[in-house]
């Protein structure tokens, strides 16, 4: 697509930063973070910035960082493989019960999550069901090879977190599209074990570069050079965590579908076109004639014809999109609306009453524990979508009717 709708931010002694942010505010701290990352010598061509960009740890959330010969573990982050999954059911809005609280309750009982009363450790299984055991058995052999090198990882929540949601902005939703078809959608990643892997390798990168940290714009830009002591181990570990995250979403989705089937009573099937995409990850890709490592820190792959998911926030709307293959963005798009303020600021500014009004049309928690996820804490999803019109086209617009938060 020939439309050029990005803004160019030049960086002194660094690569350019191309920003698809027209009409969307980006705080100065995030801009400085982008400048810092763009000054890393192994960045390839330029950094692409999505319209949901905001300040992150080390690198900006909503940025696409292509590199040659090195990877920055903190840019990938600790929620490795975090992403979205959505499926369409052969159900219509009229097939759902008048009281959606039954549906929400069934999902909350089927999927361990941080907000469930009495659950320990952010919703780990105390006794994993057979589906979780089967999934873990496929992941366990390659995980053991990683543990053999890094024994501390054996003590993580790995098996018991498969098929669990987590906390924060992770969610499970029942949505309706423009034709009143029912969709199930969820957001989660590699859980406790992914966090442990990410944290371990961030620390190792900083330890390996201890004598050079003072020369980095930010210590969280510590990196592994290709061929260095921990590089191959990190690539292996992050690939495993990304597979774990994808598997985690699949197990959860099956549990959600089973829970809804048992609740509404009407038989239904699932559309064969399921979307399961990462938005915190790194992988090797080919761009501009070169093989590069592409780190998407809060961004989704949007190759030509590729389906993706861009969620809004509680009480707004979400989008199933098709990529346009815009090479200038390294074939990427935003991963959501993006936070407009910190969680602390949202809790200071808004009340439970505000949360109740903003989510009046959604069956969800409406208490102090989720005020930091209030829709007004996020950017305007319509503005975010308008800013990336050369990156994706909308296939379906979804509105939430049930939302389960971690």
Image (tube, rainbow, N blue to C red):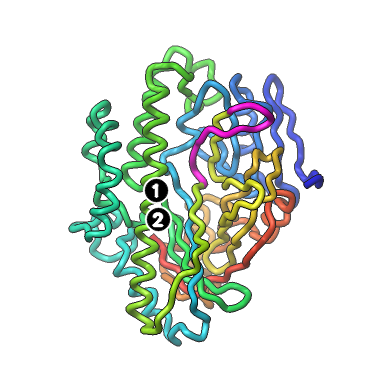
Q: Residue 35's quadrant in the figure?
A: top right
- Is disc 1 surrounded by few (<14), some (14 to 19) or many (20+) residues within 10 Å? many
Q: Residue 267's quadrant in the figure?
A: bottom left
Q: Quick one: SS at disc 1?
A: helix
The residue lying at 22 percent from left, 57 percent from top is 128
The residue lying at 44 percent from left, 61 percent from top is 171
The one nearer the camera, 9 or 330, is 330
Residue 245, numbered label:
1
Q: Is residue 345 above or below residue 213?
A: below
In this view of the protein, can residue 353 be seen by the observer? no
The residue lying at 50 percent from left, 16 percent from top is 214
The answer to if 281 sits in the magenta stretch is yes
Q: Position of residue 272 (x, y in %)?
A: 49, 65
The one nearer the camera, 209 or 106, is 106
**Magenta extent:** 279-291
**Residue farthest along the front direction in this orientation:** 272
Q: Position of residue 22 (x, y in %)?
A: 75, 48
Where, quadrant-wise, is the C terminus in this rendering? Answer: bottom left
The one nearer the camera, 208 or 70, is 70
The residue lying at 62 percent from left, 56 percent from top is 379
In this view of the protein, can residue 198 be seen by the observer? yes
Side (left or right) of 36 relative to 99 = right
Q: Mark 2 and mark 1 in contact (Cβ < 8 Å)?
A: yes
The one nearer the camera, 67 or 7, is 67
Side (left or right) of 343 relative to 121 = right
Side (left or right) of 133 relative to 35 = left
Q: Position of residue 375 (x, y in %)?
A: 56, 63
Q: Principal SS element in the magenta part?
A: strand
Q: CA distance from mark 1 to mark 2?
A: 6 Å
Q: Position of residue 85 (x, y in %)?
A: 47, 58
**Circle 2 is placed at which residue position?**
249
Side (left or right) of 146 relative to 323 = left
């Amino acid at each position: 697509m020939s439309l050029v709708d990005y803004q160019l931010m030049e960086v002194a002694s660094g690569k350019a930063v191309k920003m698809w942010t027209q009409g969307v505010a980006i705080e100065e701290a995030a801009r400085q973070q982008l400048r810092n990352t763009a000054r890393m010598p192994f960045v390839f061509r330029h950094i692409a910035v999505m319209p949901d960009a905001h300040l992150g740890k080390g690198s900006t959330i909503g940025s696409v960082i292509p590199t040659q010969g090195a990877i920055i573990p903190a840019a990938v982050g600790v929620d490795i493989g975090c992403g979205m999954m959505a499926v369409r059911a052969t159900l219509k809005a009229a097939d759902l019960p008048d009281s959606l609280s039954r549906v929400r309750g069934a999902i909350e009982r089927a999927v361990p999550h941080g907000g469930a009363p009495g659950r320990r450790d952010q919703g780990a299984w105390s006794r994993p069901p057979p589906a979780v055991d089967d999934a873990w058995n496929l992941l366990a052999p390659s995980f053991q090879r990683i543990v053999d090198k890094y024994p501390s990882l054996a003590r993580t929540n790995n098996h018991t977190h498969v098929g669990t949601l987590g906390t924060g902005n992770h969610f499970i939703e029942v949505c309706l599209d423009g034709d009143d078809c029912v969709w199930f959608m969820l957001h989660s990643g590699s859980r406790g074990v992914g966090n442990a892997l990410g944290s371990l390798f961030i620390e190792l990168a900083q330890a390996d570069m201890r004598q050079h940290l003072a020369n980095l714009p930010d210590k969280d830009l510590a990196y592994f050079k290709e061929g260095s002591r921990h590089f191959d181990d990190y690539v292996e570990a992050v690939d495993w965590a990304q597979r774990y995250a994808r598997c985690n979403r699949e197990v959860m989705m099956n549990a959600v579908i089973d829970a809804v089937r048992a609740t509404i009573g009407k038989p239904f099937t699932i559309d064969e076109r399921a979307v399961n995409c990462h938005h915190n990850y790194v992988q090797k890709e080919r761009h501009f004639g070169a093989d590069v490592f592409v780190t998407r820190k809060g961004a989704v792959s949007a190759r030509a014809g590729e389906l993706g998911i861009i969620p809004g926030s509680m009480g707004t709307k979400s989008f199933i999109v098709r990529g346009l293959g815009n090479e200038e963005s390294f074939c990427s798009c935003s991963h959501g609306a993006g936070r407009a303020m910190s969680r602390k600021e949202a809790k200071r500014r808004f009340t439970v009453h505000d949360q109740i009004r903003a989510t009046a049309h959604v069956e969800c928690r409406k208490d102090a524990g989720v005020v930091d996820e209030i829709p007004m804490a996020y950017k305007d999803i319509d503005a975010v979508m308008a800013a990336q019109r050369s990156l994706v086209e909308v296939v379906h617009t979804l509105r939430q009717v049930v939302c389960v938060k971690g």
